[in-house]
Image (tube, rainbow, N blue to C red):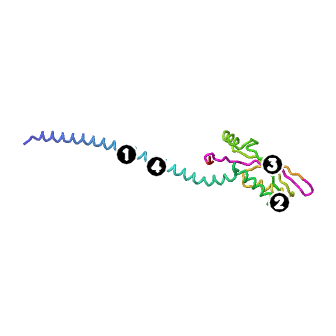
């Protein structure tokens, strides 16, 4: 039979081996826990980023309709003729004759392309300047000027003069500053 001291030594060595094994196992589990915590933190960050992106997309979709409706208040480069036709039709409907004498881009510059270039550099909204002559009875020209002034566009009457042509004939000469929008060059066809 073996001596109890050998049993005690073997039990002590077994305990030491178990404690050392437990230490290695604990270190391995701790490393895996730290890796899991890092992954969890990354997941939280990615989830927050995803929710912010989804929120931004929802906001952009929400304001896209507002942007489209706001664009209707400006005259685009391609919509100048339609705007002029609208002015003439408005005058005809109210019993006056509207003649467009001139159209100039952004304070009298020669072309819409230069206005687009200048406004892109300065960050200002491009404008179109229209010179109009309205002829008819006093009542019809004043109603026409009022209809033009309160039209659903970004416009300002910068000059207005009213004069009498004869006994019943009147004319009004006015200058309009109308907000314009640039046509997206990417949307143009070659």
Q: Quick one: label 4, few (<14), some, or many (20+) residues within 10 Å?
A: few
Disc 1 marks which residue?
A: 36
Disc 4 marks which residue?
A: 47
Cα–Cα gap, marks 1 and 2: 80 Å
Disc 2 marks which residue?
A: 95
Q: Position of residue 115 (x, y in %)?
A: 70, 42
Asked where in the image residue 117 lies, by quadrant, the reply is top right
Residue drawn at 92 percent across, 55 percent down: 166
Disc 3 marks which residue?
A: 101
The magenta stretch spans residue 184: yes
Magenta residues? 165-186
Q: Is residue 134 above or below residue 25?
A: below
Instruction: Give the label, 4 or 2, closer to the camera.
Output: 2
Label 1 secondary element: helix
Residue drawn at 81 percent across, 57 percent down: 143
Instruction: Give the label, 2 or 3, closer to the camera.
Output: 3
Nearer the observer, 67 or 130: 130
Residue drawn at 83 percent across, 51 percent down: 133
Q: Quadrant of the N terminus?
A: top left
| 169 on left or right of 147 | right
Label 2 secondary element: loop
Which tag, 4 or 1, sits closer to the chain's start? 1
């Amino acid at each position: 039979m073996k001596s109890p001291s050998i049993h005690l030594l073997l039990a002590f060595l077994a305990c030491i081996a178990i404690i050392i094994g437990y230490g290695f196992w604990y270190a391995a589990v701790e490393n895996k826990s730290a890796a899991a915590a890092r992954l969890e933190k990354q997941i939280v960050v990615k989830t927050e980023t995803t929710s912010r992106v989804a929120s931004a997309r929802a906001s952009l979709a929400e304001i896209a309709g507002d942007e489209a409706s706001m664009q209707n208040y400006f005259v685009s480069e391609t919509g100048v003729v339609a705007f002029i036709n609208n002015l003439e039709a408005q005058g005809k409907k109210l019993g006056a004759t509207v003649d467009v004498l001139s159209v100039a881009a952004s304070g009298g510059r020669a072309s819409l392309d230069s206005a687009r270039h200048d406004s892109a550099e300065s960050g200002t909204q491009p404008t179109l300047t229209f010179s109009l002559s309205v002829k008819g009875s006093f009542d019809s020209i004043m109603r026409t000027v009022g209809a033009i002034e309160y039209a659903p566009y970004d416009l300002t009457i910068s000059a207005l003069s009213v004069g009498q042509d004869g006994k019943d004939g009147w004319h009004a000469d006015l200058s309009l500053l109308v907000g314009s929008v640039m046509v997206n060059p990417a949307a143009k066809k070659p």
